Structure formats: C-alpha cells, structure tokens
Amino acid sequence: MGMTITEKILAKSAKKSKVEPGETIWLNVDVLMTHDVCGPPTIGIWKREFGDAAKIWDKDKLVIFPDHYIFTKNPQANRNVEILRQFANDYNIQNYYDVGTDRYKGVCHVALAEEGYNVPGTVLFGTDSHTCTSGAFGMFSTGVGNTDAAFILGTGKIWERVPESLKFTFNGEIPNYLTAKDLILKVLGDITTDGWTYRALEFAGEGVLSLSVDERMTLTNMAIEAGAMNGIIAADEVIEDYVRKRTNQKYEIFYSDSDAKYLSEFNYDVSKLEPSVAKPHSPDNYDIVRNVQGTKLTKCYIGSCTGGKLSDFVSAAKIIFGNEVKVPTFIVPASTNVASQLEVETISGISLKEIFEKAGCTIAQSSCAACLGGPMDTVGRAQDNEVIISTTNRNFPGRMGSKKASVYLASPLTVAASAITGVITDPRDYL
Amino acid sequence: MNKKIVGKAFVLGNNIDTDQIIPAEHLVYSLTDPEEKKKYGQFALSGVPPAHAGLPKGQTSFIEGDNYQSEFNIVIGGSNFGCGSSREHAPFALQVAGVQAIIAEYYARIFYRNSVDGGFLIPYESKDKINDKIKTGDELEIDLIENKVTNKSTGDVFSLNPLGDVLPIVEAGDIFGYARQKGMMNLPAGRQVR
C-alpha cells in the first residue's frame, strides 16, 4: 500500500521508512513559529521545565513574529511584545521580527511564506491554529499549544498521531466571480466544522494548481475550520519558483502514491460553484450569496491570514474601483509586504491603495487586528449588535469582538460588492 | 493520579470553541503571576452565549461575580469541544476556575493535546452523547480506573472511552513528567509531578 504526501513527510521526520494512520510517532521539527499571544507563556513553560540552563534546541529553527495585539494601548499586550523582545535579545534570536522596526512583518502565516520559512517536504509547528496555512507549500504544518511548543523549544521533538487523509479534487476552470474562499466555504459546508478532526486534508486537481500561491494558502488556511490536523497541496513549479526566490535551503517534493489510501475522496466541478458565505455563527453555516443578498450591513472587513493577502486586495479592488463604499470598510493588509504592494499594484494606472482611499475605505496597519477581536482599541473590532461581512476565517460568537455581533464570512469579491452597496451582494452583479 | 473525581456538572452544547472558553481580549494576562492568572478563572466560559450556558435551562453563570473559581468542577460537552484557536489559555482558564475533567463526545485536536500535555485537566470522551442526560448542578462521580461516570443525582451510569495512548502522559502529570520518566532527554529534575 502506498503513502499520502502527509504520511511520507511524517515518516521522513520520524526517521521511519513507513508510517500508518493512527500510529503515534515522535517527529523531528524543522521550524517552530510563535507570536506575541502564545510566545510569552511558551517561554515561561520552557524556563520552568528546563531550568536556568535552558537551551534552545536550534536557534536558527525558531521564528518569532509578533502580530496579534500590536497597535494597542493595552499595557498587558504591550508587555507581551516586550517579553518577546527581551527573550530575542537574551538568546540572540536572529529570526525575530520586532514591532516598531523595519523588520516588522505582520501576520505570521503570510510572513512565514514571504520570508522563506515555508519549504516543501519539511515539518513546521506553530503556536497558532492557522499554522496549517503553510501546507500550501507541500509541507506538513500544524498548530500546537504553549506546552507542546515549550517541549519543542527544548528538544526539537514532539509526538503526533499520524492522521488519516482525505482528498478533495477540484476540476474545471475557476470562473472570475469565484476565489479560493468560495471553494473552501463550500467544502466546509459539506463536511462541517468537525468533519475532519485529527485528519489530513489534501487538495488536488487542475482547479487547485491553477491557483496563485496566495489563493492556495486560503484553502489550506481553513483546514483547521474543519478540525483537520493539516491541509496540504503537493508542490509544483509555481511553489518551487516562489520558494527559490526566498531561500537557498534544499527541499524535497513529495507526491501521494497512486495507491495511497484515503478515508474519503471528494470531487468538485469548480465551474458549477456559486459565490459562497458562511452565515453566523460558524464557518460551516454555508449558503450561497444569492440566498442572503440584501442583508443590511454595518461594516465590511478585508484582512487576516485568510483574506488579507495581495490577491485578496486585487480581487476587491476590481469591484471597488471607481465606487464609494456605503458602510465603514476596513482594509487590513496581512503583512507589511502586502501593504507596500498595495502602492505598487495598479488597475488602469491607479494603485490599489488609491482605489481604496478614494472609495472611502479605512486602511489599517498590518496585524491580526479585528479578525479575533483583540483589545478594546483594536481597529475594526465588532461593536454591539453589528452585522459584518468579512474575508476572515471564523465567525464563532464573539470572535470579532462583540458577542452580540453577526459575522458573515465571504470572498474578497463578495465583501467588495457588499461594501459598495451596504448590503450583502453577489459579485456577479458588479463584474 | 487520583482514582475518582467527584463534583458538580456544568453542561454545555456542541462546538464549544476557544473564543467561548476564554474570549481573545483576555489573552493578555500573565499565566504565571499568581494574582494576575486568576483573571483566566474569572473569565472562563464567559464567551458562551447566556442561553447556552448551563444546560438544559441556560442562563447559569459558570463563575459568580468577581470570583475566579467555579462551584462546577466537571464540564460536560457535546461534539467537537475546544474547536477554534490553539490557545492553551483555554484549558488553563478552566483549570484555574477549578475544573478537573471534561466529558465530551470528542475534542478538537489542539485543545485535547493542550489539556493532556499541559496536565491541566482530563479530557474524557463519552461513549455516547450524554450532555442531554445530565443537568447542570447534578452531582457526578468519575471513576478513572473503571472509565465510567455515575450521575449521583439520578443514578445513571455512563461509559467513558479509555484514555489509550495518552494515559501514560496523564499519569505522569504532563508531557514533561512523561519525558522525564522515559529518560527521553536530559531534563533537570523539575517541578513536583502534579
């Protein structure tokens, strides 16, 4: 019996010739990533357990991106960034991207890709559930808590149960009114938020390989919304080209064997899919935009690791171009690199930044911002019983701030069309 | 490891996510400062919409007023308990509030790992759905040897799935205790095993 990509990478990491689903194995970790919310407690546990002489297993493999609560006056949030800064200084951590310097990057999952830490065939753990995003690079990546991260920090090792794999094949050509967000919302609607607890989601097919790197990351990013351990797409020349521009590290590309075993296989004809939303209060509360169009909104939000990449803003700008937004609309580039690209990328000679500014959008600094609510002074935070449409990844009660708010998740095209009308709107009406 | 956990049940529904267990705005507090960490107990389960808090009636406070410890030390959930973010603050907050065990049909992966590897509480899986058979405030007794829970208020007995692969970690206190026992690495003697 053959193996899937995920099984092959885990076997390599565990120094075994073969692994099987359900088997508990010890992995050798290639990269550990943490941020300002989970970094300080991780460091605290590591010091408590390994004592005064605590040593980092491999400094070059530790990457720290402060990104969650950055532009806030909250003293405890600022203290957390100060703890990271002190730690990076004390232990001479080169891969620390400090707030308030030109090294600051923004949202970790996007920055991991941009800074060359995503490498095909490797194993990445991060103290964030959306660490699965990196699976778009043909690597194994998943989230862990502070204790597991502290254990990795001291040993470079962690236990994991080999997941069963599921395969999603997208066939056909993606129409211009759909993005990867519509695809993954459809998948979540079909399989629900706990459909794949502890499992590996593998995405394949011409519909996937025709996607840009940004868009592939939207697919793998939301694997966790199905409860999955990881999402993964085999690397191809598009990924190789992206990686080679950012790192000299050697990489190995794995493919699933033709006789690999999948728990289930799903096939989608993308040409037949519709613009999608997840209604309040769960990412699997699927509907098509047509069924909720006309719903009055108080706010639109385009940002986060899921929906704040350059491709997301290019999509949104196509619709916002030449229009004015009818409700407060927040543009939050995931990374400082994406923010600078908004000034470079143009439509009819006008930069995306100018298009958004002229339309009356609020452009915020790069961070996780209101995707997860955050401190009270976070830009775009949900207030009271607001009704919001957002390109982010979760709409659980209170996720964006107020417990009373209702959040719809949608593609940047749908959010943009809704921004210029003030009600939920199908992007096909404006393309 | 104690052989029995006795106490009052707090009953919740399906898909209790980490934003409901500890809302993101509270993730800024220290987890080590003895006074500040009480905030995690104070706001544990504060994100659960009131209608769903303390089933079947709902509208039940898990924490009264400014307290940081709950009168309920066993949480009963449905499917997919702990889904959402990777925040270890979630099982930590429940532990600070005094929760010793959760019984749910199944858990999100990271929450389950965090509970076990961090040694915060025991995440038991019930063989069947039980959050519609236990009421908030019922007196329960979990038998950790026999893998069963008795509802002393009604006399009902429910089976629990054995902890399986993670039992040695639960028995050792946490992943560090386990690694020390196994001589897996050169860890200093460290804390007392909980």
Image (cartoon, coloured by chain):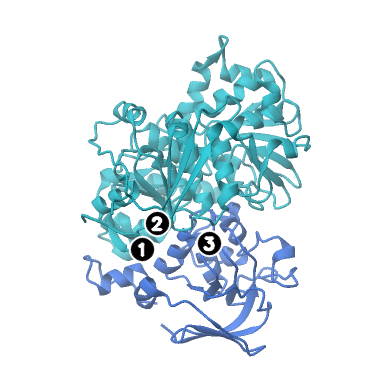
Observer-nearest residue: B91 or A10? A10
What is the chain identity of the residue bearing mark 2? A
Q: Mark 2 against mark 3, which lies toward the viewer?
A: 2
Check if mark 1 and mark 2 are on a common chain.
yes
Amino acid type assigned to the residue bearing label 3 in the image? Ala
Q: Which chain is cyan?
A: A
What is the chain identity of the residue bearing mark 1? A
Q: CA distance from mark 1 to mark 2?
A: 7 Å
Q: Are marks 3 and 1 in contact (CB under 8 Å)?
A: no
Q: CA distance from mark 2 to mark 3?
A: 27 Å
Residue with the mark numbered 1? A22
Q: Is residue B71 left or right of residue A248?
A: right
The quadrant of the rendering that contains the C terminus of chain A is: top right
Q: Are marks 1 and 2 in contact (CB under 8 Å)?
A: yes
The colour one sees for chain B in the rendered image is blue
What is the chain identity of the residue bearing mark 3? B
Mark 2 or mark 1, which is nearer the start of the sequence?
1
Q: Work out whether residue A228 can be spotted.
A: yes
Amino acid type assigned to the residue bearing label 2 in the image? Glu
Residue with the mark numbered 3? B90
Residue with the mark numbered 2? A164
